[in-house]
Image (cartoon, rainbow, N blue to C red):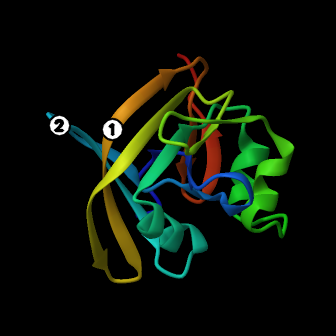
Amino acid sequence: MRNLASSVAIVATGAALERRGLTVSSITSICIEPPCLLVGINTNSGTHDAILANGRFGVSLLANDHQDIALRFAGQDGSKGVQRFDTAPWDQGTLDVPLLQSAICALECVLHHYHVVGTHGVFIGRTVAVRPGDGSPLINCRGELRTLARG
């Protein structure tokens, strides 16, 4: 599965000191009517439990210059919980979920369906708000963060 290239995003929920978030590359659009997306999150993650408790989450699609943010939210620098939000500007969306201000696109979702598959919770979120942005996407392929080259 490491050969399956995918976009990189921050999935986050909560407000103030209760904010939680993590880097994901297991995210996809699954339908347009109603607009829904699917995201897989390890059941051991605090963000997993926070999304279940809050019933809503934000998805910030990362740009090619967001590698440091992706690594931070993947826990590579040792930060946890609300500390992860300290190094970049965030907004609270209409659903009161954290959204990265510089994301190439930010989506707000209410939890539509949840199911456990192996080690991960599969969250299907119904998208209720979208904020478009700008930039080229950050991609995960073969365990490396990459950018799309124009040819």
Residue for point 76% across, 68% down: 80
Give the residue pinned by disc 1.
127
Residue 118, image x, y percentages: 34, 83
Tell me which numbered mark, 2 or 1, is placed earlier along the sequence.
2
Residue in the foreground of this view, choosing between 63 and 37: 37
Between the C-alphas of marks 2 and 1, the distance is 8 Å
Q: Is residue 126 left or right of residue 90?
A: left
Residue 7, image x, y percentages: 49, 42
| Vertical side of 6 occupied by 136: above or below | above
Q: Is residue 5 left or right of residue 82?
A: left
Q: Is residue 70 left or right of residue 107?
A: right
Q: Secondary structure at mark 1?
A: strand
Residue for point 64% across, 53% down: 144
| Vertical side of 68 occupied by 136: above or below | above
Give the residue pinned by disc 2.
34
Kind of residue at badge 2: Pro
* Quadrant holding the N terminus: bottom left
